[in-house]
Image: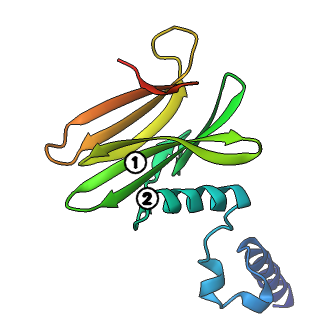
Amino acid sequence: MKRNLGIILFLASISFMLTGCSANDFFDVHSAMSPPVVSVEQAEIESLVGDYLQKDFKLSYLMIDNKYSSSLKCSVGGEEYTVVFCETEDDFVKSHCMFFEKKSGKWALKDDVVEGNFKFQSACVRDVNGDGLDEIVIDGMNVNNSSVKTHMYQIQKNGIIPVQ
């Protein structure tokens, strides 16, 4: 009987250790449900989005590199860029694809590409047309007729260029 009780206690203690909870907050549900901490860089970019839009917005979480994210990082010509996806709503949904460029250690808005009644679904960086330069490829759906549409953009010094 003592042996069985020892085995049960041993298994219970291992199960308790594998939960990821500590003893002092084991029954505190809110501590287990808290979101991850936002980095300083993410907070800076989100603040820039709010300052630029001057209205309520919600981040759009797309499938990027096999995980859901609201931003896509890339490097073009030695420069760092972050593409942020978000939505605003007036009379209809407006999806924003905001390109931020890192200048002198700070993020600055390079361009905002807006598509009405469009929902982003996935994004990636790849050379689609074989010219040796990467394009931002964004797949999404037209809200009105549920048709799938792909947008492609190339980051260049003078701006964001749509690619056919």
Residue 50 lies, in percent from the top left, at: 50, 62
Check disc 1 and report the residue beneath it: 96
What residue lies at 40% left-to-right and 68% top-to-bottom?
Answer: 56
In the foreground, 52 or 127:
52
Above/below status of 61 relative to 90: above
In the foreground, 154 or 118:
154
Give the color scheme: rainbow, by chain, secondary structure or one colour. Answer: rainbow
Q: Which mark is residue 108?
A: none
Quarter in which the C terminus is drawn = top left
Above/below status of 12 relative to 61: below
- Left or right: residue 94 versus residue 24 is left
Check disc 2 and report the residue beneath it: 53
What residue lies at 51% left-to-right and 33% top-to-bottom?
Answer: 124
> Which amino acid lies under the numbered mark 1 shown in the image of this protein?
His
If you read the primary sequence from the N terminus, does the residue marked by circle 1 or circle 2 appear first? 2
> Which amino acid lies under the numbered mark 2 shown in the image of this protein?
Leu
Element type at mark 2: helix
In the foreground, 140 or 151:
151
Quadrant housing residue 21: bottom right
| Residue at the extreme left of the image, as rendered | 145
Above/below status of 164 relative to 139: above
Element type at mark 1: strand
Q: Nearer the viewer, mark 1 or mark 2?
A: 2
Residue 88 lies, in percent from the top left, at: 35, 59
- Left or right: residue 147 versus residue 15 is left
Above/below status of 82 relative to 77: below
Quarter in which the N terminus is drawn = bottom right
Packing grade of label 1 (10 A; few <14, some 14-19, many >=20) is: many
* Label 1 with label 2: CB-CB less than 8 Å: yes
